[in-house]
Image (cartoon, grey):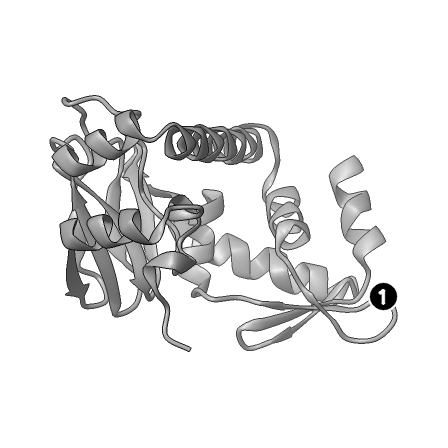
Amino acid sequence: MPFSLKDIPFFEGLSEKEVSLVKECLREKSFEKGQTLFLEGASCERVFFVKTGRVKLYRIGPSGREQTLETLGPGDTCACNPGETQWHCSSTAQAMVPSTVWFLSREHYVRLVRDDVALARRLNRLFAKRLQCFSMLIEGVSLLDSKKRVAKFLLDLPGTAEGPGKDVLDLPFTREELAQRIGLARETVARQLYELKRLKLIDIRGRQIVVRDRPGLKKILEK
């Protein structure tokens, strides 16, 4: 079933008339892998909603290392503007795979947020969730060593049960992207993953990781 505007949580609860009005304001655009949607510091002229593919939001630190802040998939939005007419992008957005997004101009977006109380509330929930994710990211990058960062990342991923005590984790990104997400070098991530495998806490199957001992992973965070 094709993904539609009604599948976007941000627009949940809108009437048919409101959905039609939003559709008229949206502009669809496709991006190849690696293409930039917007740059950090640029004036926020529009927000986007992911239709297909994956888009990462990231910043470059003083050392030149890239830090991934969020990975957005179908239905997700970059919306961080609380409804101000003047706003600047706090991160850079880049397509991780061939992706299609819907753009909504700042003018239309600001009008929607100001005129629709329910939409403004959903935006507040989005801000709260994003703040919680960023707080966890800051904690992981600043307070945890490399092994704990990798273990916590795996524990936070949703998995599919594969028998008693085993969860299969699908990794929708490369080791390089994983490293950028938790603020480590790719080589360090690879080393820690194989160390966890040596300890029989996980198995590695290409882009899948099988968690063999979840309690064991949790104990790493307690040390």
Q: Residue at x 31, y 25 (%)?
A: 82
The amino acid pointed to by label 1 is Gly
Q: Position of residue 111 (x, y in %)?
A: 20, 30
Query: How many numbered tags mark residues here?
Result: 1
- Is 2 left or right of 210, judged from the image as shown? left
Q: Residue at x 64, y 55 (%)?
A: 154
State which quadrant residue 121 falls in: top left
Q: Position of residue 9 (x, y in %)?
A: 44, 49
Q: Can residue 73 be seen from the camera position used here?
A: no
Q: Categorize mark 1 by other alpha carbons within 10 Å: few (<14), some (14-19), many (20+).
A: few
Q: Residue at x 57, y 35 (%)?
A: 140
Q: Is residue 60 above or below residue 120?
A: below
Q: Can residue 68 be seen from the camera position used here?
A: yes
Return the residue nearer the eye: 152 or 156. Answer: 156
- Is 134 left or right of 99, judged from the image as shown? right
State which quadrant residue 66 falls in: top left
Return the residue nearer the eye: 197 or 15. Answer: 15
Q: Which residue is mark 1?
A: 165
- Is 129 left or right of 26, judged from the image as shown? right
Give the position of the C terminus as an image quadrant: top right
Return the residue nearer the eye: 26 or 87. Answer: 26
Q: Residue furthest right?
A: 164
Disc 1, SS: loop
Q: Position of residue 20 (x, y in %)?
A: 24, 54
